[in-house]
Amino acid sequence: MPSRRSNRLLSAVLLLMAANLLWAGQGVAVKLLSGGLEPLAIALLPIYFITILGLGILATQRNVAQKFRAAWRLRREFFLAGICGQLTAQVGMTLGVNWSSASNGAILSLLIPIFGALIAVLLLHERLSTLRIGALLLGLAGVFLLSPLHSTAGSGTRTHELAGNILIATGCLGSAFYNVYSKRLLNYFSGIETLFFSYLSTTAFSLPMLLILEPHCFNGLTQLTLTQWATFGYLAVFLYGVSMVFYLRALGTVDVIIASASLYLMPLFGVALAFSILRERLAPRSILGAAIVLFATLILFRFDYAL
């Protein structure tokens, strides 16, 4: 029995690491697409694509009609998860990164574990132990060493960046809400079903808004370069699809606070990718920050679950 539990936890750890690795490139992807699509289109069109793909996958299941009826009975919950969670998260993060920077997006995304821990205590009554508080704060300290904030010249630029940072923080709150609220839906649906039905509600609510605010959004798709199409595919399939399925599957095994703490791995992976692919130089403080982040994350899984 302990061995089986250990295997489930190890599987959850690997899924969370894979999800964070896929999430690490979101800011860069948004910047790459910013020349070809409008900000709202960047945030929402990939969600529409993965929703259609999810509908196709769900249609292959024998009990698809039963699943839709069950989802309709919980439509309020799915609309809350989709609109207050996914829509707020993706629009806030995408617009914020467009106005601010990818690095600020990566740094401010570390508010998600803090927001998630507080929401989990309020909605799910998860315990906020001294170990969990200490690990969250330690991981946050490590990230600031890993990704120091940069300064920009010009008061106009700073004002624009401040607005972007506020939007990013709003997106972080939406993401934290979705991470917590979706755990309740996992009691009735699988991870991919929970993701699809929440995306379906997001699509139904946001599509009219997108067509009003950016009426020519679909025309921009015809002008994307090959690199931008690859980036769009990454956002739709891997960021909004595969990574979220990995995260939701892990969420079925561990508490939200533990899963949220794994988000501290995102900037660590970002630095690792920059070092291995772009050959960027690692400063000593970055190495120290990476070590602190790893320590804070591992200590939670090792001692919080007493394995």
Image (cartoon, helix red, strand yellow):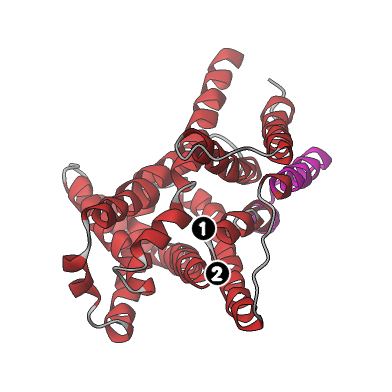
Three-letter amino acid code at the position of disc 1: Tyr
Residue 124 lies in magenta, yes or no? Answer: yes
Numbered tag placed on residue 60 in the rendering: none
Which residue is identified by label 2? Answer: 100
Task: Look at the numbered disc 2 and give the secondary structure of its residue.
Answer: loop
Residue 52 lies in magenta, yes or no? Answer: no
Q: Where is residue 216 in the image (x, y as percent from the top left)?
A: 22, 80
Secondary structure character of the magenta stretch overall: helix
Rendered-image quadrant of the C terminus: top right
Q: Which residue is drawn at 68% across and 66% down?
A: 151
Q: Which residue ends up furthest to the bottom in the rendered image?
A: 212
Q: Where is residue 156 in the image (x, y as percent from the top left)?
A: 61, 83
Asked if one can make out residue 190 in the rendered structure from this viewpoint, the answer is no
Q: Which residue is drawn at 16% across and 67% down?
A: 222
Numbered tag placed on residue 178 in the rendering: 1
Nearest to N terminus: mark 2 or mark 1 = 2
Relative to 78, 149 lies left or right: right
Residue stretch rendered in magenta on the structure = 117-143
Three-letter amino acid code at the position of disc 2: Ser
Relative to 112, 27 lies left or right: left
Asked if one can make out residue 294 in the rendered structure from this viewpoint, the answer is yes
Relative to 140, 212 lies left or right: left
Label 2 environment density (alpha carbons within 10 Å; few <14, some 14–19, many ≥20): many
Q: Position of residue 161 (x, y in %)?
A: 59, 74
Task: Look at the numbered disc 1 and give the secondary structure of its residue.
Answer: helix
Q: Which residue is drawn at 41% across and 67% down?
A: 79
